[in-house]
Image (cartoon, rainbow, N blue to C red):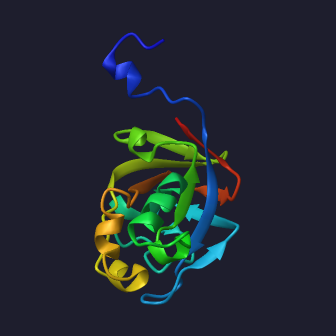
């Protein structure tokens, strides 16, 4: 059992899992789901239009557990993660627990939490009226790449 608050910040119940991955080859088009992707320290997700533009936001991640809440807020039975325009959906691990931490996706990739990922105005179009507010507090996180490699659906997500 952790002895102090600092240790609590580095204690999670179990690893998470990569459930879904997407890239967007061009701006203003829908994301393309993929089963694996190459991750680069310079580019983020190789093949994603956002590659390398902002080192603090190489990759966006969202929790699978938040998808039913977002769906409920907009009156839908479920939400396709592609509508949310995030790169990776993770389950089994509270992404906010990664704040100030480095974490590993699969065997090779190491990311560093850089902030929360706030919704954009496109959520109103993607999810309908109230879509922007439905995503507030549930938008996931942004991360920069510390070490590149391959990420696949099914890979573990764990603290370094």
Q: Quadrant of residue 149?
A: bottom right
Image vertical order of residue 117 relative to residue 121, above or below: above
| Residue at (51, 85) in percent of width and height | 30
Picture mark count: 0
| Residue at (35, 65) in percent of width and height | 135
Between residue 133 and residue 95, name the one nearer to us.
133
Image vertical order of residue 26 relative to residue 2, above or below: below
Q: Residue 156: in sight, yes or no?
A: yes
Between residue 80 and residue 58, name the one nearer to us.
80
Q: Residue 147: in sight, yes or no?
A: no
The percent position of residue 50, horizontal first and vertical second, equals 43, 76
The percent position of residue 40, horizontal first and vertical second, equals 54, 62
| Residue at (60, 37) in percent of width and height | 15
The percent position of residue 130, horizontal first and vertical second, equals 31, 75
Q: Quadrant of residue 92?
A: top right
Image vertical order of residue 44 relative to residue 121, above or below: above
- 106 vs 146, left or right, is right
The percent position of residue 70, horizontal first and vertical second, equals 43, 64
């Amino acid at each position: 059992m952790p002895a102090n608050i600092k240790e609590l910040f580095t204690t999670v119940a179990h690893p998470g899992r990569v459930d879904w991955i997407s890239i967007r080859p061009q701006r203003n088009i829908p994301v393309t789901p993929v089963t694996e992707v190459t991750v680069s320290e310079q580019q983020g997700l190789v093949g994603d239009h956002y590659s390398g533009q902002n080192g603090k936001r190489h990759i966006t991640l969202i929790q699978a557990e938040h998808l039913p809440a977002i769906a409920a807020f907009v009156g839908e039975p479920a939400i396709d993660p592609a509508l949310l325009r995030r790169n990776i959906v993770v389950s089994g691990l509270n992404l906010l627990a990664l704040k100030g931490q480095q974490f590993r996706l699969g065997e090779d990739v190491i990311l560093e939490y850089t902030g929360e990922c706030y919704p954009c105005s496109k959520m109103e179009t993607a999810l309908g009226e109230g879509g922007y507010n439905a995503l507030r507090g549930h938008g996931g996180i942004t991360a920069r790449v510390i070490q590149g490699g391959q990420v696949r659906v099914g890979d573990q997500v764990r603290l370094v």
